[in-house]
Image (spheres, helix red, strand yellow):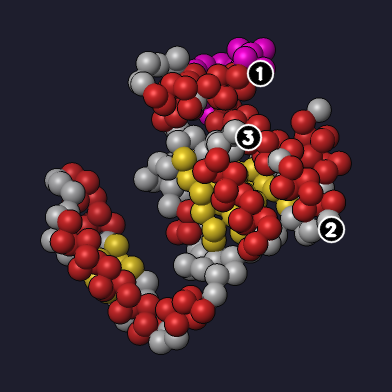
Amino acid sequence: MRLFQGAADGTLKAGTLQHETRMATQAPDITDLIANNRSWAEGKKAVDPGFFRRLVAQQAPAYLWIGCSDSRVPANEIVGLDPGELFVHRNVANLAPPQDANYLSVLQYAVQVLKVSHVIVVGHYGCGGVRAAFRNQRLGLIDHWLSPIRAVMRDHEAELAALPNDAAREDRLCELNVRRQVENVGADPFVVDAWAAGANLAIHGWCYSIADGLVKDLGATVRNAAEAARLRS
Ligand code: CO
């Protein structure tokens, strides 16, 4: 089954109908993915013969994306960026935990080596990780990973309780979680030191809606240590 027609204009023509058919039946064979890859690479080269040569020469993204692992939130695609334009870190529920060496390695590299101008923490409504934390589900190791979200819940207990129903509470918790992760990034020593050295670096919090494909800016952007401290207060 061939899902994507390698288009001469370089875009992946993932026909909606084909996609829906696939979801209704079964996942493609692994060899189909290789075929898709060949078509994609050919399409890219067809519109821009130097595309891959340029990527080999350098990586200079201006953005670090910290998002959820959820398969419905494909980072580059949502914001219309090509390979080479977005440095990406994803984990369950888009966390930025100050003790996580994986996230910290990505953050340090992005800030100190790539010198990105923007870090974007992107949550999404309907996040399974946020839901599991909210419902206090027992799923295994992930329960430990999600403990920062339960902390956010406790910190905003009154606000969440005042909402009309659990769906609204889970949506709001997705937003509050993003905001907390923006606070974490803004308090990180790598980031604080970069600001002190005069770096042009902004941290943003967004929440993505799987239902309509749109991101919502949560208004939690911080551009310096003072703004980051204000967000935490
Ligand atoms: Co998620």
Residue 93 in picture, x, y percent from top left: 49, 35
| Camera-side mark, 1 or 3 | 3
Q: Which residue does the numbered mark 3 point to in the structure image?
A: 98
Secondary structure state at the residue bearing disc 1: loop
Callout 1 touching callout 3 (CB < 8 Å): no
Magenta span: 154-171
Q: Nearer the viewer, residue 75 or 58?
A: 58
Q: Nearer the viewer, residue 35 or 56?
A: 56
Residue 214 in picture, x, y percent from top left: 52, 49
Q: Which residue does the numbered mark 1 point to in the structure image?
A: 156
Residue 184 showing in the rendered view:
yes
Q: Nearer the viewer, residue 164 or 109?
A: 109
**Which residue shows up at 67% across the image and 55% down it?**
111
Q: Amino acid at mark 3?
A: Pro
Residue 80 in picture, x, y percent from top left: 50, 63
- Residue 111, label in figure: none
Q: CA distance from mark 2 to mark 3?
A: 23 Å
**Which residue shows up at 82% across the image and 35% down it?**
229
Image quadrant occupied by the C terminus = top right
